[in-house]
Image (cartoon, grey):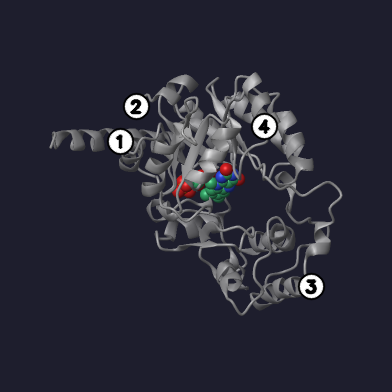
Amino acid sequence: MITPLAKKLGLTMPVFAFSKAPAVVAAVSRAGGMGVLGAVAYTPDQLREALDYIEAHCDGKPYGVDVVMPEVYVKPGDNVEAHIPPEHRAFVDRLLREFGVPELPAGEAAWHSLLGWTEETVRPQLEIIFQYPIKLLANALGTPPKDIIDRAHDNGILVAALAGSVRHAQRQIAQGIDVVVAQGTEAGGHCGEIATMVLVPDVVDAVGQIDGRPVKEVAVLAAGGIGTGRQMAAALALGAQGVWLGSLWLTCAESDVNAEVLDKLLSAGSGDTVRSKALSGKPARQLKTAWSDAWDNPKNPAPLLVPLQFVLTAEATTRIHRFASDSTTRTKELLTSPVGQIVGRMNQVEPVAVIMDRLRAEYETALSRVNGYGQF
Ligand SMILES: Cc1cc2nc3c(=O)[nH]c(=O)nc-3n(C[C@H](O)[C@H](O)[C@H](O)COP(=O)(O)O)c2cc1C
């Protein structure tokens, strides 16, 4: 299972794990894959603490970091609050009242709203990240800025970017990235409309050249809807050099999701997600709940653009998570999480090491079954 990219990065399994939980990142790296820390919601101090934890617990194995460097940033000094229409604020208040969501206690602050989404905040994150011996820097949205790619390369770090279409992948390759994460619509979080089964081979075929010109070797990872070794085997057969998994880690033993979210994820089926702008203003796959239903209802105000929807809903999201366990209210009905269609297979809590062993065993079984069919 050692693909050229896995070899280059020193992995024994070409499994890349996106997670915002440092314990998951370290556990996947220890198990021979590559944990990638999702940094978007971290303040600089929290980020340092998370990276120190990973350094201390990854047994010297390679790990990476994922940041959000949008192509259009909120500029320093922009007053984003001023762009939020009053009827949107009134709608959020009405929704919270309808479900009886309590107010935050005095002195308790709402979560972040912008953090890694602005140039002002992501650049300080990068200053910290470059102080650690990471092996991969990934970007969630769009093409990373050229100066960041060059600096990563100067530090011996490979740069990855998520792409939901061939056009996105080509733009990223032209900018000099090393790894395209071809992410299908089945994926949790922001996603496009093309399924992994169609997208991966199209991106694999497209990466070798741009506008007819050959480019340096770029590896493709398959993402979206992968949670078993059988699906890994399929991804490698499609031409990917590894798989990039996000949802699966939400329900592992090392995950840090709250108890009510965990409960919802474990009982959800593959048809219980929706691609909606409710979370961020950009289409993102998430659990279908009263929150997404409300925002997707054409009778209600439409979600705002990124990053205004975050700013508008930061306090509401904090309150919903804080009070989801309060059974005297209907708060839990509004509780959601980004997650992909693979949620239907996330039915029990297992440690990362067990999941990695299972992926390996299933991959080998799938391979020998297919080999057993012989040649046509
Ligand atoms: C809870 C959650 C949060 C995510 N946040 C980010 C993010 O901040 N940056 C990013 O590059 N991808 C993010 N993603 C997408 C993952 O990196 C990954 O591409 C996706 O989960 C793969 O599909 P899967 O969910 O079917 O495994 C997120 C996914 C989930 C489930």
Quarter of the image for residue 338 reads bottom right
Dividing the picture into quadrants, the one containing residue 105 is bottom right
Q: Do the residues labelled 3 and 2 touch (CB within 8 Å)?
A: no
Q: For the residues carrying marks 2 and 4, which lies nearer the camera in this image?
A: 4
- At label 3, the amino acid type is Pro
Query: In this rendering, would 40 be left or right of 196?
Result: right
Residue hosting label 1: 363
Q: Residue at x 44, y 31 (%)?
A: 208
Amino acid type of disc 2? Met
Could you tell me which residue is drawn at 73 percent across and 39 percent down? 122
| Label 3 – label 2 distance at C-alpha | 55 Å
**Regarding mark 4 in the picture, which secondary structure is present there?**
helix
Amino acid type, label 4 = Lys
Q: Residues within 10 Å of mark 2 (few under 14, many from 20)?
A: some
Residue bearing the label numbered 2:
1
Q: Mark 4 points at which residue?
A: 146
**Any part of residue 45 in sight:** no
